[in-house]
Image (tube, rainbow, N blue to C red):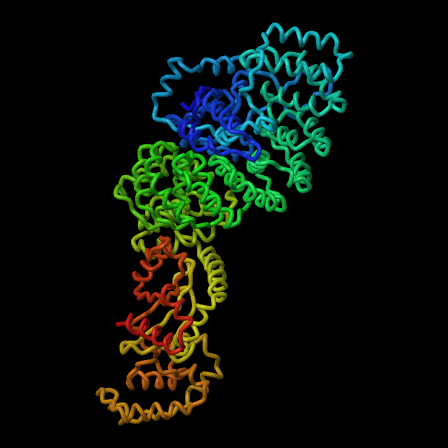
Amino acid sequence: MALVVCRRFPGSFCGTPPRPALIKHHINKKLPGQTCEDCVLTAKAICADTRMAATLKLLKPLGYRAFCSPFACSAIQSMAYWNVGSGTRHRGQDSPEHSSLCHPAKKVGNIRSTSSSQRILTTSSALPSLEFSRASASKASTLKPGSPRAMKVDEEDVEVFDSFEDPRVFLQLRPEYQLHSYNRSEPCQPLSVSEGKLILHEVTVYQDNLQPQIIADCFCKLSSVPAEQHPVLLPSASFSVLCQLSVKNIQLFDTPDLISILKAFVSLGIPPSHSMLDVYEARFCHKVWDMSLDQLLLVADLWRYLGRRVPRFLKIFFSYLNLHWKDLSLSQLIHLIYIIGESRQSPQDLMQKLESLILKYIDCIMLEEAGTICLGFFKSSSSLSEFVMRKIGDLVCADMQHLSSYALVNILKMLRFTHVDHVNFMKQFGQIAPQRIPSLGVQGVMHLTLACSALRILDEGVMNAVAASLPSRVAYCRSKDIAKFLWSFGTLNYKPPNAEEFYSSLLNEIHRKMPEFNRYPEHLLTCLLGLAFSEYFPVELINFALSPRFVRLAQERSKFELTKELYTLDGSVGIECPEYRGNRLSSHLQQEGSEILWNSARKDMLSKPEFLEALFLLETMLGGPQYIKHHMILPHTRSSDLEVQLDVNLKPLPFNREATPTEDVAKLRFKHVGVSLTDDLMNQLVKGKSGGHFQGEIQSKTEQQPMELEKKAAVPLGASLYSVADRLGAMETAGLCSPACMQAPQVKLAIQLTNKNQYCYGSRDLLGLHNMKRRQLNRLGYRVVELSHWEWLPLLKRTRLEKLAYLHEKVFTSAL
């Protein structure tokens, strides 16, 4: 059973190193105008901090229901109930990935209001959406630290993390953050339940004469009532009256009163979907231009803490910032980026301005703040320039051992998103990651692994540590985590020492989580493609993934276009599993996938000058476009090839009839190029007698032909008379031989012009997809001729003869 347990974490946070290490790095870092005493006070505050943190603990049994909020300890007893299966989004998170056969380790459902659509503007209303289940609250309150049940939970092998509080750790690094952020640990005088009842009674009696200031004070006082007493006070009619009075007088509240009431709502655990909050959001929207930056950030932070999305308020807030962005201090900047990330809203014009401020403050940014910046930009799908990312990488490299694992993961997310290969950062990451991976949650490990694969960096120490730690914790993986692990190992084309245990544990978990994969079909296809890269083809899963039912599910339910993934899987199975007799993709979808991939690959290759140069020179060397064909030999592998076919005598065959127009074929039938193929000449060629005099004669005659013949009957460098005559003879007979009479090719070449993105970073090891393609080409009888980028690109600056000599050697040597 999975439980939400409220625990105290004295002085340390989930996913962060011990506080002394944090202080050691930050104690000497200060802002302009900040004294050393301020830094020391900040460090002491970090050490002394003891806060309540809601921790979601995932146990191995399958089903569960939670009864308390994972983000507000005071709300544990005040919420009506939690429904883990609720489809309502909460706190900006995606819908929970949960089923009877899977364990979502992080995402939880929303509080379901019994009547959130009802308004509270009538005095007869009793705030139905604030009705509380005393039984549920009582049950949740029994799970206290130190209780036998809680101790039993602690003994389990669990994943511990706090998805709401962990991103807010940075708010405790500087005293300036207290000016514009909500701090639940602020000391306050507790109010007894009897005093709370008295306040509510006075509200009922004097409701017609209450001033706005008194209404605000009442909320503030009630927020000091202990959380376990909330079920006693909040469902009462008196509290409903107080809420109605606040809505009725909302136009009379000044900004500090509105903020204090919003703070009280957080402390009291008002459900984020409550209709009363609509009125407050509208009022704050009207007040934006009258508020200071600190006030605006505080209000945005309170909305975040309530778990309520306020796009209208943020849109106006961001418009305000577009005019006042230069006034942002460092703490305001970092806090703003956090709010933007959590809201998933990215005003691009504003983000560019914030990037310039990051560069302005880069020397004063702390390690954890660097992680906050990266996470905010990542969550809002906003990119940072390569220059800024390298600056952040340099900052972290100076003291990476003191960087928390949480911040490390966030920086790697942004490096992956921006495709910045910070070599020094990744080297230091490779040194510290193997030691941290065993103590890092599986979702964090997944992001580390995915970053390595996206950046094409194969660090065997990191990958081995991931593979070693995962089998014992695989039950805590979501379907997404399994998919990314398999994809990452397959993409890097790496099998760890414990490959059998690693892959079998993940395959078993896929079977256990099939209901979850039905809800996220893209994850199953990602799993199977990653396995295919690594030469694993689980027949039962493939048969299910290619079934008409799942294909229809993938097309209807997924937010991604999965035709290419289905086509790649189907094509790979067709070649590598000849004994497979299960489901296959329909011919219609195969054709659709082929067209999509060919259009993309053709457009990509024809835009590359290095490819066009190679294609033109190969046509010249072989005798014309009919001897070479640019197409996708294996369309499902997503890249194109230059195919050449040679006969038993290693002569090029004019198999590409589409490349030669009819009128050109007629011309080639009878056109001489300076050499008559007599019986004597053929006898000499067959017997291998080719004197130097005759070769010189051919050379002198062919030099007199027009330049246009160079494209049609070019002589390869170093070619013998035998190959010259063969080429000319092939030209004379081109168009005369029908497909039926053309001899079958003895050698089929697949010429590939590669680029650096097809290899692991800094190596010549192919990535999984491209290694799989060559494996399948070999199975079909092709010989792969690689025009590697490290050989071909430097040749582009050399002479034409040198390029022709290189291509001749590649083609005819590979054919031997």
Residue at the image point whose x is 57% and y is 29% from the top: 176
Q: Is residue 543 visible?
A: no
Quadrant the N terminus occupies: top left
Residue at the image point whose x is 51% and y is 50% from the top: 387
> In this rendering, is residue 82 above or below 99?
above
> In this rendering, is residue 243 above or below 776?
above
Q: Quadrant of residue 281?
A: top right
Residue at the image point whose x is 40% and y is 34% from the top: 402
Q: Is residue 511 visible?
A: yes
Residue 587 x/y as whole percent: 44, 57
Residue 165 x/y as whole percent: 50, 28
Q: Residue placed farthest to the right in the image?
A: 209
Q: Quadrant of residue 576?
A: bottom left
Residue 105 x/y as whole percent: 43, 30
Q: Is residue 755 left or right of residue 300?
A: left
Q: Is residue 759 left or right of residue 334?
A: left
Given residues 366 and 777, the one toward you in this image is 366
Quadrant the C terminus occupies: bottom left
> In this rendering, is residue 55 above or below 136?
below
Given residues 184 and 468, the one toward you in this image is 184
Residue 626 x/y as whole percent: 41, 77
